[in-house]
Image: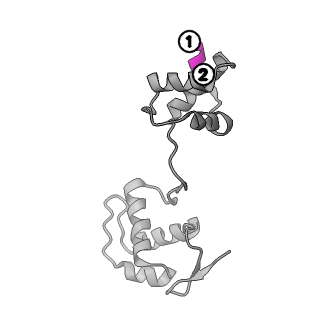
């Protein structure tokens, strides 16, 4: 599990967000001490909340700022790795092309993507191949586009 002990004496796992219960407890504590969820104003200090929940002051501040700006107490989703070169529209176009003509070659798809896709010529045939095998969307959106063709 690779848990570590913070300087506040709380165990945590690096790279893993605070659980939702702790996030909500931090927010509730700030609101109970005069925090305004509309403006973000907090007359107290984060230091009290920091000591009570044994988390870093920057963590308390970030949880609070995210809550009053986005009205969201969920941690940000962090996807690892490099961003894909194909957009959702590119993937949908590939699916449409493959559904219309299953025997279409990767080279033909590549040429069409370069002409009308969003990838801007910054992709390769192997990227298209991986997209077809792993990430190609299949849903009602593709069927809608097929009807238009």
Q: Kindly indicate the quadrant of the structure image that contains residue 19.
A: bottom right
Q: Is residue 60 left or right of residue 93?
A: left
Q: Secondary structure at mark 1?
A: loop
Q: Earlier in the sequence, mark 1 or mark 2?
A: 2
Q: Is residue 127 magenta?
A: no
On screen, residue 117 above or below 15: above
User: Dominant secondary structure of the magenta stretch?
Assistant: helix
Measured in 3D between alpha carbons, the distance from the residue under mark 1 to the one under mark 2, in whole angstroms, is 9 Å
Which residue is label 1 attached to?
Answer: 149
On screen, residue 103 above or below 20: above
Residue 102: x, y in percent? 69, 19
Instruction: Check if mark 1's residue and mark 2's residue have beta carbons within 8 Å.
Output: yes
Looking at the rendered image, the quarter that the C terminus falls into is top right
Residue at the image point whose x is 52% and y is 30% from the top: 90
Which residue is label 2 attached to?
Answer: 96
Mark 1 residue crowding within 10 angstroms, few (<14) / some (14–19) / many (20+) = few
Q: Nearer the viewer, residue 104 or 41?
A: 104
Q: Which residues are magenta?
A: 143-149
Q: Is residue 141 visible?
A: no
Q: Is residue 66 visible?
A: yes
């Amino acid at each position: 599990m690779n848990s570590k002990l913070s300087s506040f004496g709380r165990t945590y796992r690096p790279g893993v967000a605070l659980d939702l219960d702790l996030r909500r407890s931090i927010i509730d504590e700030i609101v109970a001490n005069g925090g305004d969820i509309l403006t973000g104003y907090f007359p107290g200090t984060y230091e009290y909340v920091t000591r009570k929940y044994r988390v870093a002051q920057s963590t308390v501040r970030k949880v609070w700022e995210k809550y009053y700006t986005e009205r969201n107490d969920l941690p940000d989703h962090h996807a690892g790795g490099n961003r894909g070169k194909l957009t959702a529209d590119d993937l949908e176009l590939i699916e449409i092309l493959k559904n219309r003509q299953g025997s279409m070659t990767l080279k033909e798809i590549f040429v069409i993507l370069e002409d009308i896709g969003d990838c801007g010529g910054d992709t390769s045939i192997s990227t298209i191949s991986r997209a077809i095998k792993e990430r190609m969307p299949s849903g009602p959106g593709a069927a809608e586009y097929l009807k238009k063709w």
